[in-house]
Amino acid sequence: MENKASARRFEGKVAIVTASTQGIGFAIAERLALEGASVVISSRKQENVDEAVEKLKSKGIQALGVVCHVSNAQQRKNLINKTIEQYGKLDVFVSNAAVNPFKIPLLQTEESVLDKLWETNVKSSVLLLQDAAPYLQKGSSVLFISSLAGFQPLPTMAMYGVTKTALLGLTKALAAEMAPNVRVNCVAPSFIPTRFASHVTADEAAKKAYEELTLLKRLGTVDEIAAAAAFLASDDASYITGETLIIAGGTSSRL
Ligand code: NAP
């Protein structure tokens, strides 16, 4: 599925997507922009930010690019400040950054790695929202990117799964705290071919095994995640808050 936007649900709206220079974050930013949003692209590396902004420009989309390592307090504040300077408001905040150390059993994971997982995947989302919240208003919406692994941690990346479980709780807690003006939701994708998942998707046998776990017999695409994200962030989901939408082609998950 290609990023297809027939609606204009974000006309006049301003959206920040963290970790958005490629993969799922980029696809979400592109989708929101195609539907009319002014989008802010960010990630750790200036060259990646510049490249992503150029890529959008080549598709006729103007975007603001700001470097933001989500674990850096100064850069988090700068991301929000630059957005407000440029656009004067903020309507949609998508918290997408995560790290994913692979094949380290939980009981052998060093404390520094546990700290990094917690800091990048969970804590930075809370701190970013502390900075963003003063600018969110009635009708604004927040979206977290969890994972199917948040429901069932995989043995090869168990602690990553645990941090994604934490985002399910964070979604509920912040939805209550930010109600009634701001909605807070979450999406939980299964494996999607991106750089992040390349350790699985580059291995044909592993890829096939994950395809077989789905009812649709294929892996999803970044644009399919973006389409669901755009729905939850839009007024079409105006009576949905505190929810997580699993996007996994029917892979067994929960009732
Ligand atoms: P990806 O294609 O590898 O892209 C990762 C993006 O994050 C890049 O733009 C990268 O740019 C940026 N980034 C990495 N660390 C960052 C940090 N500390 N601060 C700011 N930006 C950072 O990854 P993806 O697959 O799209 O994953 C995005 C999200 O989807 C993650 O939360 C992941 O857990 C979730 N997810 C992915 C899958 C999957 O199978 N792909 C499944 C379920 C959930 P720089 O290198 O320039 O920083």
Image (cartoon, rainbow, N blue to C red):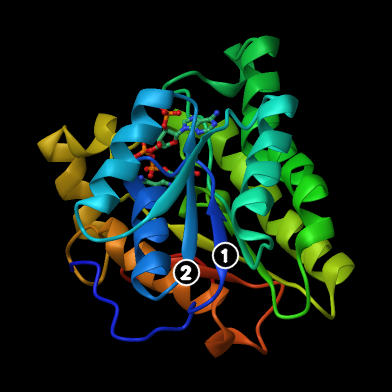
Quadrant where ligand 1 appears: top left
Q: Answer with left or right where residue 195 lies relative to residue 105.
A: left
Q: What residue is at 50 percent from the left and 48 percent from the top?
A: 149
Q: Does residue 99 lie above or below 249 as drawn?
A: above
Question: How many numbered discs sit on the rendered protein?
Answer: 2
Q: Position of residue 245 (x, y in %)?
A: 52, 71
Q: Position of residue 155 (x, y in %)?
A: 47, 33
Q: Which residue is mark 2?
A: 37
Q: What residue is at 77 percent from the left and 45 percent from the top?
A: 126
Q: Does residue 99 lie above or below 194 as drawn?
A: above
Per the image, label 2 sits on a secondary structure element best described as loop
Q: Do we see residue 116 in this rendering?
A: yes
Q: Do we see residue 248 in this rendering?
A: no
Tags 2 and 1 touching, CB below 8 Å: yes
Q: Amino acid at mark 1?
A: Val
Please tell me how crowded label 1 is: few (under 14), some (14-19), or many (20+) other residues with Cα within 10 Å: many
Tell which of 65 and 104 is nearer to you.
Answer: 65
Q: Amino acid at mark 2?
A: Ala
Q: Residue 14's mark? A: 1
Disc 2 C-beta below 8 A from ligand 1: no
